Image (cartoon, grey):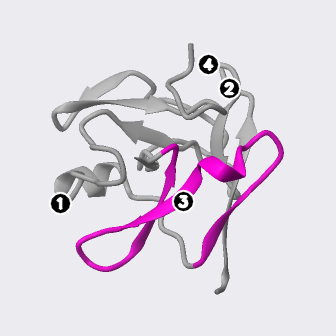
Amino acid sequence: PPRGPRVTLRDSQFGPVLFDGHNRALYLFTRDPRRKTRCYGACAEAWPPFYAKGRPRAGRGVDRDLLGTIERRDGRRQVTYKGQALYFYVDDPRGQVLCNDVFEFGGTWYAVDAKGNPPA
């Protein structure tokens, strides 16, 4: 299988949280059940899914055993961490976390710490 995207742990104003290999913050959505996603349509436009072709790779500080993927309705694979689907926020500048603890689309969006939880 092809090499998937890299997930790294970087410092933010909320402490160390997950970023992709292009320095974009990653978020979980509290409305998502484990290993599933409910974010489609307008939700997925505001919060684009973190897609993977191949197995996601763990950077320093990231637990490789917590990384995985799920299949979306369109057949594309979305990266998960501790069973939670991961997303970007469309207006986040690279290297910044603007939308931690934001309620939108029926759930709360959180940055993700190394254990797969919202930052303390």
Residue at left offset 61%, top offset 35%: 96
Q: Which residue is farthest right? A: 60
Residue 100 sits in quarter? top left
Q: Are marks 1 and 4 in contact (CB under 8 Å)?
A: no
- SS class of the residue under badge 4? loop
Q: Which residue is farthest front? A: 65
Q: Which residue is farthest top? A: 120
Residue at left offset 34%, top offset 25%: 102
- Give the magenta-colored segment's residue range: 54-82
Residue 107 sits in quarter? top left
Which is nearer the N-term, disc 3 or disc 2?
2
Q: Amino acid at mark 2?
A: Ser
Above or below, 59 against 119 in this view is: below
Depth check, front residue: 3 or 105: 3
| Residue 12 numbered tag | 2
Q: Amino acid at mark 3?
A: Gly
Query: Left or right: 1 with respect to 35?
Result: right
| Residue 68 numbered tag | 3
| Foreground: disc 1 or disc 3 | 3
Q: Are marks 1 and 3 in contact (CB under 8 Å)?
A: no
Which is nearer the N-term, disc 1 or disc 3?
1
Q: Amino acid at mark 4?
A: Phe
| Residue 91 numbered tag | none
The residue carrying mark 1 is: 41
Q: Which quadrant, please, contains the N terminus?
A: bottom right
Report, in whole angstroms, how far the alpha carbon at label 1 lies from the one at label 2: 29 Å
Report, in whole angstroms, how far the alpha carbon at label 1 lies from the one at label 4: 29 Å
The residue carrying mark 4 is: 14
Which is nearer the N-term, disc 1 or disc 2?
2
For label 4, the crowd category at 10 Å Cα-Cα, with few meaning under 14, some 14 to 19 and many 20 or more, is some
Which is nearer the N-term, disc 1 or disc 4?
4
Q: Which quadrant, please, contains the C terminus?
A: top right
